Amino acid sequence: MRYFALFFVILFPWSSTASASWDKSLAEPVHMSARQMDLADAELDLADAGAIKVVYASEYYREQTPAERVVEISGELEVNYYSGRKGASDLIGKQLYVEAKLPESDVSVWGFVYHDPEFHELYAGLAKQLGNWQVALGAGVARYGGENHIVITPWVYYESDDYEVSFLIERYLNEQDEPWFYKGTLKKKFGSYAFGIYGEKGIGIGPLFSYAVSDALELWCAAPIALQPEEGGAAFILGLRYGF
């Protein structure tokens, strides 16, 4: 904490014959307690010295810079192409994730939107940073099959210089047949390239490859080869991700 006080001493004469010059003895620094220094825009009238007015103001400076005192906004915009398999139609899914980190906190508020021709969902929640890990819980609404479904979704995310892990679960509370959905990735980084595993319910699990075109733009692809459904699903997935 740093406090600064600015003093102005103005002397008005008692009579027209009084001298208009400054009384230097009255312009000496005034020593005040911490309590007094914390009173901003206060005025103190010194009656025994005529109409002498001392005005001071204090300002509190935080250690953080202005940029650190505002909410930090980040997110990802992603477009994925699913190549249909065994009679399934090709599909393009679009999703947006936005996160707002609270000032001087490891807690974030986040929101997620997804849309494709067959499925739409919107949910939001809170996330907490625990070292390289981030854990979150959210709730919202999904619409598919002509009905709305309440969604509860926990997820975890990990990132270091060498690895990146993400895994989410969605629970549709009023769905009877297939109330659960999962999706996850595990990647090992090699500079701008990364190799790993991709998994998604209804699609399968298989190898994953990604290439970071820049700090903000990434291209990736996955080819499910295990746990695929008997019908439908995707032969491969192509993705374009933009971070901000």
Image (tube, grey):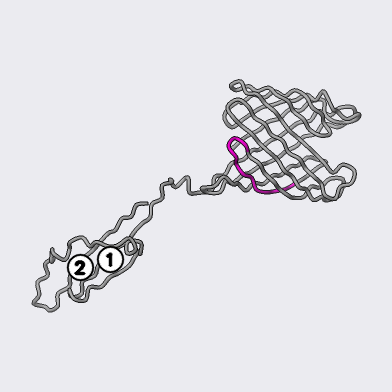
Which residue matches tag 1?
Answer: 55
Q: CA gap, disc 1 to disc 2?
A: 10 Å
Q: Which secondary structure lies at badge 2?
A: strand
**Type of the residue with mark 2:** Ile
Q: Label 2 crowding class (10 Å Cα cut-off): few <14, some 14-19, many 20+?
A: some
Q: From the top left corner, tell me how far across and down residue 5 is, in percent.
A: 29, 58
Can you tell which quarter of the image residue 3 is in? bottom left
* Image quarter of residue 178: top right
Left or right, residue 50 beside residue 145: left
**Is 73 above or below relative to 197?**
below
Of the image marks 1 and 2, the number of the one nearer the N terminus:
2
Magenta span has 131? yes
Q: Which residue is mark 2?
A: 10
In this view, the residue in front, 138 or 224, is 138
Instruction: In this rendered view, identify the residue nearer to me: 214 or 154.
Output: 154
What amino acid does circle 1 point to? Val
The x, y position of residue 176, in whole percent, is: 89, 46
Boundaries of the magenta span: 122-133
Residue 60 at x, y percent in the picture? 38, 55
Seen at 76% across and 42% down, the residue is: 115
Q: Residue at x 64, y 45 (%)?
A: 127
